[in-house]
Image: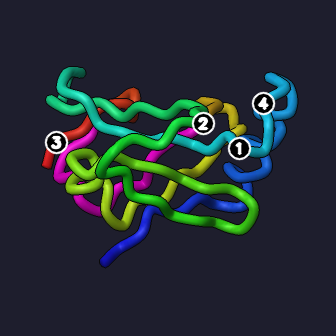
């Protein structure tokens, strides 16, 4: 079974944001996929502290990534990364399952 991983840059930024938001150590990163966007499916990332039935857990050093089972079908093998460059700043999903992505990088197709 493939995992969902997070790059070191993204992990550092996520921890920084969690501290700024004063979120406790029980919080984790929740990633998911929803219908929509110009390519058909849209990535979603948020901080959460409530596990749901059928959630999949992926521990990554001091952070835990959680994904619902339906979204995991699209996100297996994905790495969550963070870019802080001139061409855009923010978290992005490096998804080996995506056959097509849009220019903004927030939606994809399989």
> In the visual, does 2 lie left or right of 69?
right
Q: CA distance from mark 1 to mark 3?
A: 33 Å
Eye-nearest disc, 1 or 3: 1
Disc 2 secondary structure class: loop
Residue 109: numbered disc: 3
Bounds of the magenta span? 91-101
* Quarter of the figure with residue 97: bottom left
Eye-nearest disc, 3 or 4: 4
Q: CA distance from mark 2 to mark 4?
A: 9 Å
83 versus 11 height, above or below = above
Q: Which quadrant of the rendered structure holds the N terminus?
A: bottom left
Tell me the residue that label 1 is attached to.
26
**Mark 1 and mark 4 in contact (Cβ < 8 Å)?**
no
Tell me the residue that label 2 is attached to.
49
Disc 4 secondary structure class: loop
- Which residue is nearer to you in this view: 42 or 3? 3
Who comes first in sequence, dot 2 or dot 3?
Answer: 2
> In the visual, does 106 lie left or right of 6?
left
**Mark 2 and mark 1 in contact (Cβ < 8 Å)?**
yes
Instruction: Where is residue 95? Give x, y as percent.
Output: 35, 55
**Mark 4 and mark 2 in contact (Cβ < 8 Å)?**
yes
How dense is the environment of label 1, judged by Cα within 10 Å: few (below 14), some, or many (20 and up)?
few
Q: CA distance from mark 3 to mark 4?
A: 33 Å
Tell me the residue that label 4 is attached to.
23
Instruction: Where is residue 96? Give x, y as percent.
Output: 30, 62
How dense is the environment of label 3, judged by Cα within 10 Å: few (below 14), some, or many (20 and up)?
some
Residue ID at (60%, 30%): 88
């Amino acid at each position: 079974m493939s995992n969902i991983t997070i790059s070191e840059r993204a992990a550092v930024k996520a921890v920084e944001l969690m501290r700024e938001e004063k979120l406790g150590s029980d919080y984790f990163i929740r990633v998911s996929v929803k219908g929509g966007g110009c390519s058909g499916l849209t990535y979603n990332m948020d901080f959460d502290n409530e596990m749901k039935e059928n959630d999949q857990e992926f521990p990554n050093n001091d952070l835990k990534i959680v994904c619902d089972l339906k979204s995991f079908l699209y996100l297996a093998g994905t790495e969550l990364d963070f870019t802080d460059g001139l061409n855009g700043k923010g978290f992005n999903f490096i998804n080996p399952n995506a056959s097509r992505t849009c220019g903004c990088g927030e939606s994809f197709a399989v």
